[in-house]
Image (cartoon, rainbow, N blue to C red):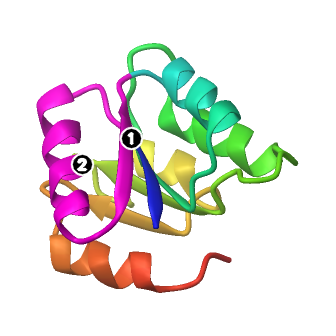
Amino acid sequence: MNVLIVDDNQAAADLLQELLTLQDHTARCTYTAQQAMDAAAEEHFDAALIDLTLPDFPGSEVARRLRASTAEGTPRLLVAISGFSAQDAAGEAAKGLFDHHLQKPIDIAQLDRILAQPAR
C-alpha cells in the first residue's frame, strides 16, 4: 500500500514512514498541508495519514479537498492522526471526513488493522 503521511512533526512523520516501510508499505512524508496536496496531485496514494493541526491549514481541510477531488489515484482511505481525541474540538471538526481517527502516540497494531481494510 502506498501511504501519504502528513504531519508537521517531522521526526514523528519520518519514524512512521520507516515503520510502514518495514511492514512492506511505501510511504511519503509531507510536513504541511500544501505539500500534501501537491504530493496527492503528483502520485497515487492508497491511504493518507493526516495530522489535524498543520501550520498552513487544518488537516480537516486537507481531507475535505481530497474527498472532493475526482483525480484518479486520490487516496480514499483517510486516517486522522492527532494528539487530540476524536471528541476534542479538532476531532469534532473532522468528523465525517476521515474513515478513522488515531490518537498520538499511534498504536501501530491498530494502524496495521486499518490499512488492511478496504477504503470506504
- Residue type (three-letter) at the residue carrying disc 1: Arg
Residue 51 quadrant:
top left
Residue 77 quadrant:
bottom right
Residue 66, horizontal then vertical, whole percent: 70, 44
Secondary structure under tag 2 reads: helix
Secondary structure under tag 1 reads: strand
In this view, the residue farthest toward the right is: 70
Please rate how many residues cluster around mark 1, counting C-alpha atoms within 10 Å: few if below 14, some from 14 to 19, many from 20: many
- Residue type (three-letter) at the residue carrying disc 2: Gln
Q: Which residue is mark 1?
A: 28
**What is the number of callouts on the image?**
2
Please rate how many residues cluster around mark 2, counting C-alpha atoms within 10 Å: few if below 14, some from 14 to 19, many from 20: many
**Residue shown at 25%/61% (left/top)?**
20
Residue 99, horizontal then vertical, whole percent: 55, 69
Is 20 magenta? The answer is: yes
Is 49 magenta? The answer is: no
Q: Is residue 16 left or right of residue 87?
A: left
Q: Quadrant of the C terminus?
A: bottom right
The residue stretch that appears in magenta: 6-31
The reply to whether dot 1 and dot 2 touch (C-beta < 8 Å) is: yes
Q: Which residue is mark 2?
A: 17
**Residue shown at 34%/65% (left/top)?**
25
Residue 96, horizontal then vertical, whole percent: 64, 62
Residue 80, horizontal then vertical, whole percent: 42, 54
Q: Is residue 63 above or below residue 108?
A: above
